[in-house]
Amino acid sequence: RARAHAAPRCCAPRSDESADPTDAVYADLKGRLKRTNLFFVGMMGSGKSTVAARVASGLQYRLLDTDSIIETATRKAISDIFRDEGEQAFRELESSVLEQAHSYIGCCVSTGGGVVTYRRNWSFLQSGLVVWLDADVDVLFGRLQHDTTRPLLQTPDPRATLQDIFKARREWYAQADVRVPIDAADSTDAIALDVCRRLNTFVKEHPPRFSAVYPSNLSKQPEND
């Protein structure tokens, strides 16, 4: 950030010297989105929760994390739901939460890795913009190899399992509006800024889709509970 070192201490720097270019990116996108929801999809370990939180902060959006909502509602960890009730039961809960989340506006929604594999969920996802955080298997495994809370990776060869899951889901992730490649060295702030820049480009190139007014029964924001 530029600083006006020569200015007297009693004088504020000019606005063009104090402006953070990152703030300008967020402000530009916020104006273009008009409270359109953002849905973050991608593999486990791709950083959906942390990146969605940073983008939500920059846009002054509400953050919704489907896994956290499920855990709060059921008072059970995701891994326990998988173990006790099975993956199908979890996916149904996830779809129900997504259905509720999509009726709000001005939200960044972090979703579970498998949410894209259920066709019904796409009717909810496509009510907003879908952002795919695309990290390769080496990056994912580096982040997840010591994580014992991931039920789908409790296998003899978790890396091979991760590769199989990624292959099965890749075509679904590719349906997203915006793809953001993830590098292991990237910071959360850098990824979030890249997300916003790519979204800005997408919305500029596809303005008709976002010019419609939400129906009155959908034009609501989540309560601050």
Image (cartoon, grey):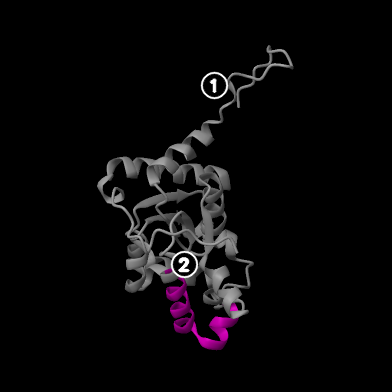
Badge 2 density bin: few <14, some 14–19, many ≥20, Cα 10 Å = many
Residue topped by disc 2 = 113
Q: Nearer the viewer, residue 208 or 41?
A: 208
Disc on res. 90: none
- Which is closer to the viewer, label 2 or label 1? 1
Q: Amino acid at mark 1?
A: Asp
Classified by dominant secondary structure, the portion drawn in magenta counts as: helix
Which three-letter amino acid code belongs to the residue tagged 2?
Gly
Q: Give the left or right position of residue 151, taking residue 98 as reference.
A: right
Q: Nearer the viewer, residue 41 or 152?
A: 41
Which percent across, then down, holds residue 109?
48, 60
Q: Dot 1 surroundings within 10 Å: few (below 14), some, or many (20 or more)?
A: few
- Tell me: residue 111, above or below residue 155: above
User: Is residue 114 in view from this perspective?
Assistant: no
Q: Does the image show residue 50?
A: yes
Find residue 16 and name its label. Answer: 1
Q: For the N terminus, which image quadrant?
A: top right
Q: Is residue 176 above or below residue 27?
A: below
**Residue extending furthest front?**
216
For marks 2 and 1 on the same chain, the one whose residue lies earlier in the sequence: 1
